[in-house]
Image (cartoon, rainbow, N blue to C red):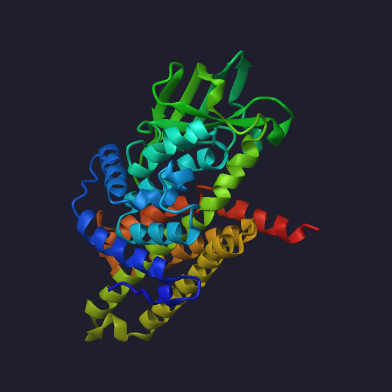
Amino acid sequence: MADTTWLDWPFFDDRHRALAGELEAWCVDALAGIDHHDTDAACRKLVASLGDAGWLRYCVPAGPDGAWGGALPQVDSRMVCILRETLARHDGLADFALAMQGLGSGAIALMGSDALRRKYLPRVAAGQAIAAFALSEPDAGSDVAALSCSARADGDHYVLDGAKTWISNGGIADFYCVFARTGEAPGARGISAFVVEAGTPGLDIAERIEVMAPHPLATLAFDNCRIPASQRLGEPGQGFKLAMMTLDIFRASVAAAALGFARRALDEAVSRARGRRMFGQALADLQLTQAALGDMATAIDAAALLTYRAAWLRDVQGVRTTREAAMAKMAATESAQAVIDRALQMFGGAGVVSGMPVEKLYREIRALRIYEGATEVQKLIIARELLKD
């Protein structure tokens, strides 16, 4: 039985506790039959199922008279974190499917025109359109300001040329939020954002990327890709700011996903310790095992406190949480890696058998220490915030 005592912390109210209980019951029933052999098909099915069940509605705001499809007037970070933590504990790909709907449409919610919001957000919330966030490039990952994909104004259109890579949902997305250099100023101030429909002439999937924890991932190629200027998000030159705002909103939820993986690993470790006989006693009777479990549980609670502090500050205090979200993302992903590694160790040889829960968790967690800002980048963000006047 999963530990839910953290829901009694003062960060949450009855709405959050109800959401967690309802989602837990849904996961047990809905996720058991997902076939992961075809990752693209599984992801499409998960997006549709999450949309049908109403969970994706928490990833977008409601908009005027509910026109954007969201469940609440504004995205509630604590609810998104609860969603991601619970889904990750059950199925990493389900967490991915929900997270990318939020991240891939977040820029539209923040700076899209009313027409763009009405066109895309309700379909995202219903699971009828798959979203993608196209920021990284072959030579511009953590150094976002160095991106070179260009968007040239041509009358009432823009023409995009260049490449994007490591794009989650690449190859299955219905649209991409693309960040490209428009040249209003050097560096970060010369970047703008656009919504590009899949199937637009000049947009091709150059390569599908296979990774250790399978999920849809691709390199995109833009070659004279012509889109209406009305597809631009915000004003010219606001793209870098928009990308950072979008990442700030969802960064704490990456920490929550890591918590889900870590909690599942701890559950598996406790079960193993109780059931495994060794030297005439249970593995749980050995003091080394007890010490390891104590370390694991403490690391999880410490990361959870950082995670939900960041989400609470954004929701309740309405303040920027750049530093707090970076702390949460760094601490939760790093500690989850350690927790999962220790859980796998308790399983011995059985822990590295393909398909075992701890083996899958070991592969799932590794990417979270890199994407949406590697641990090293989070340290720089924290330090810069500390050093501000």
Quarter of the view holding residue 171: top left
Which residue: 60% across, 46% down? 245
Instruction: Say which of 44 and 149 sits in front.
Output: 44
Name the residue at the left extreme.
33
Q: Is residue 236 left or right of residue 134?
A: right
Give the percent coordinates (x, y) of residue 52. 27, 47
Which residue: 33% across, 85% down? 286
Q: Which quadrant, please, contains the C terminus? A: bottom right
Give the percent coordinates (x, y) of residue 84. 40, 57
Which residue: 45% across, 47% down? 60
* Res 168 visible: no
Give the percent coordinates (x, y) of residue 288. 39, 81
Q: Which quadrant, please, contains the N terminus? A: bottom left
* Res 106 visible: yes
Name the residue at the right extreme.
389
Q: Is residue 313 left or right of residue 38?
A: right
Instruction: Say which of 112 and 226 sits in front.
Output: 112
Residue 370, compared with residue 192, is above or below; it is: below
Which residue: 29% across, 37% down? 40
Q: Is residue 116 left or right of residue 147?
A: left
Q: Is residue 176 left or right of residue 281?
A: right
